[in-house]
Amino acid sequence: MTAKTKRKRNTKKAVPARTRPTIGERVVEGLTQAIEWTKGRNHRVRITLVRAPDVNVRQVRLRMGLSQAQFAGKFGFPPGTLRNWEQGRSSPDTPTRVLLAVIAKHPEAVEDVLRKAS
């Protein structure tokens, strides 16, 4: 065989089989499961529920020694909304209850984050 007639060797290496799904595949699977679950078709879906704490906003505010206007301004709540929460006309939604729970325990952490954001 001459140099011109030599065949090229197959240099492709075998691709190892994946053992774990990629992040994208996991996201798609999770979304598919969520859609199926909302339609009532898939009962083998893992659901994690977190109960947000109930927070007495007025108690937290008074413990901090702040007026409604001061508390609302310091933590970015509309004063009217804060007033409604305290008077029982409305209730904070779940993410807001989580934020209020953090304010109740670690107000300095929330103040620090808000200060850095502005």
Image (cartoon, rainbow, N blue to C red):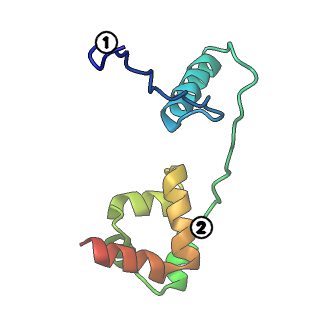
Residue 8 location, x and y as percent?
A: 37, 19
Identity, as a three-letter code, of the amino acid under mark 1: Thr
Identity, as a three-letter code, of the amino acid under mark 2: Asn
Q: Is residue 94 above or below residue 72?
A: above
Of circles 1 and 2, the one toward us is: 1
Residue 51 location, x and y as percent?
A: 68, 51
- Comparing 117 with 91, the one in front is 117
Residue 99 location, x and y as percent?
A: 50, 64
Q: Secondary structure at mark 1?
A: loop
* Residue 87 seen anywhere in this rendered image of the structure: no
Quadrant in the picture for residue 48: top right
* Residue 5 seen anywhere in this rendered image of the structure: yes
Q: Residue furthest left?
A: 118
Q: Residue furthest right?
A: 44
| Residue 56 disc label | 2
Question: Residue sitting at 35 percent across and 16 percent down?
Answer: 6
Question: Residue sitting at 57 percent across and 26 percent down?
Answer: 29
Question: Residue sitting at 59 percent across and 67 percent down?
Answer: 56
> Callout 1: 10 Å neighbours few (<14), some, many (20+)?
few
The quadrant in which the N terminus is found is top left
Q: Is residue 44 above or below residue 58?
A: above
Residue 106 location, x and y as percent?
A: 54, 79
- Comparing 98 with 63, the one in front is 98
Q: Secondary structure at mark 2?
A: loop
Q: Using the numbered discs, state the Cα–Cα distance from disc 1 to disc 2 in whole angstroms.
A: 86 Å
| Residue 5 disc label | 1
| Residue 47 disc label | none
Reading the chain from its start, which is encountered first: label 1 or label 2?
A: 1
